[in-house]
Amino acid sequence: MTSTEGAPFSLELGDDLREVQGWVHEFARDVIRPAAQEWDEREETPWPLIQEASKIGLYSLDFFATQWLEPTGLGIPVAFEELFWGDAGIALSIVGTGLAAASIAAVGTPEQTGEWVPQMFGTPDDVKLGAFCASEPDAGSDVGAIRTRAVYEEASDEWVLNGRKTWATNGGIADVHVVVASVHPELGSRGQASFIVPPNTPGLKQGQKFRKHGIRASHTAEVILDDVRLPGSLIVGGKERFDERIARVREGKSAKAQAALKTFETTRPSVGAMALGVARAAYDYALEYAREREQFGRKIGDFQAVAFKLADMKCQIDAARLMVWRAAWMARNGKEFTSAEGSMAKLMASEAAVRCTEEAIQILGGNGYTREYPVERMHRDSKIFTIFEGTSEIQRLVIGRSITGLPVR
Ligand SMILES: Cc1cc2nc3c(=O)[nH]c(=O)nc-3n(C[C@H](O)[C@H](O)[C@H](O)COP(=O)(O)OP(=O)(O)OC[C@H]3O[C@@H](n4cnc5c(N)ncnc54)[C@H](O)[C@@H]3O)c2cc1C
């Protein structure tokens, strides 16, 4: 006989997490939601909203760090789901810096994290942004194909960066850019490193700003690097550590590819949580609508065809949330990802968001297809989650490799 007394398993959020959830939800409901349509149409960075978030401490290093370090791992998923429930474009403008900051905090030296991460956020009176620039025109899913070069000049102890980045969230308008470049091209992704480009560095400029299908309040642009000179110390993690790693790669001893995969597994659940927020927003709206709208003398929610859609949406959202929470908990608690559980969570949540937002349009009928109602925006917004941070195909590839142990192509 087994006893369940003292069983550690629980899906109930603790008091601190519920407090964070409620606080972020209030901001999403009262500040983000009412502004969503305006900023979607303006297709501009919603600076006043970022500033509002900064004033209450939501857009701050302190908030992000506290949630990343929250012991259950659910701090970020819970906060992101609420923010993106408010509006995905504005929410991405608020959390984009957090993702760039994480790229330094994860592998940077304590000095680099201490100096540059606070500068990415600025202050409530003078908010700043951070950007993470990996993708290039010919290197999207295939990050090993990155052509941006970083060359070390021994005499001046400087790195010189040249190349063209694309799709960078906050690219060109950020104060601090983190740029992935190839130092040893013959080693592919194992010869790459990230570099911190400080504010106003000559040679870095914004290229084309993209006009997008969705998340239009979030700024996405090319970043051009033309003889950008950086002090030798601005290679993320430090030059000594990088040189040691390269030496190990050359001796055939490096496990770096494994390490990078692990990092993705730990960050992907947070992208899943973003998608979840959008899915839930569309579901909530469609549910209310189905309870009110009448046709043939009855509520449309009374038609099985509509109620079944809502049932499927609810199931998909709850299933995706359980996967996001599982992966986030595993990441925080150092559990081994034996089946690419981080990728599984991102895949399920992003595809659920696309399906749920589409069904929400169907439930609203003609109204759902107009800009008078928010579900068409949510549908446009949802699609990004199957593309960035690894497309759905790439997630399936990672999961497929992980479960079969074969080099699935
Ligand atoms: C709005 C937005 C914001 C972004 N923000 C950032 C950012 O801040 N920083 C950053 O560095 N990048 C960012 N990205 C880039 C994003 O990560 C890439 O778009 C994504 O990785 C896909 O790369 P790609 O667009 O070049 O598509 P491709 O890699 O060209 O893929 C095209 C199609 O081919 C499929 N495909 C490719 N390879 C395979 C394969 N091996 N097996 C099966 N199918 C495959 C893909 O799944 C996809 O369907 C952003 C993109 C967008 C649209």
Image: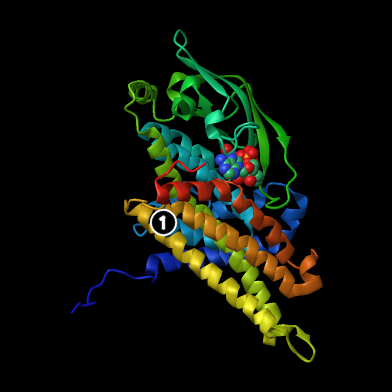
Looking at the image, is 6 positioned above or below residue 181?
Answer: below
Residue closer to the observer: 87 or 252: 252
Q: Residue furthest bottom?
A: 297
Q: Position of residue 407 (x, y in %)?
A: 45, 41
Where ligand 1 lies, by image quadrant?
top right
Residue in the picture at 54% in, 63% down:
82
Note whether 318 is above or below 92 in the view shown.
Answer: below
Question: Mark 1 near ligand 1 (CB under 8 Å)?
Answer: no
Q: Residue at x 59, y 59 (%)?
A: 351
305 left or right, relative to 135: right
Residue toward you, 206 or 241? 241
- Residue annotated with mark 1: 328
- Residue 378 in picture, x, y percent from top left: 68, 61
In the image: residue 131, left or right of residue 334: right
Residue displayed at 40% across by 69% down:
13
Count of numbered tags: 1
Q: Nearer the viewer, residue 237 or 382?
A: 382
Left or right: residue 100 compared with residue 42: left
Instruction: Please name the amino acid that badge 1 sits on.
Output: Ala
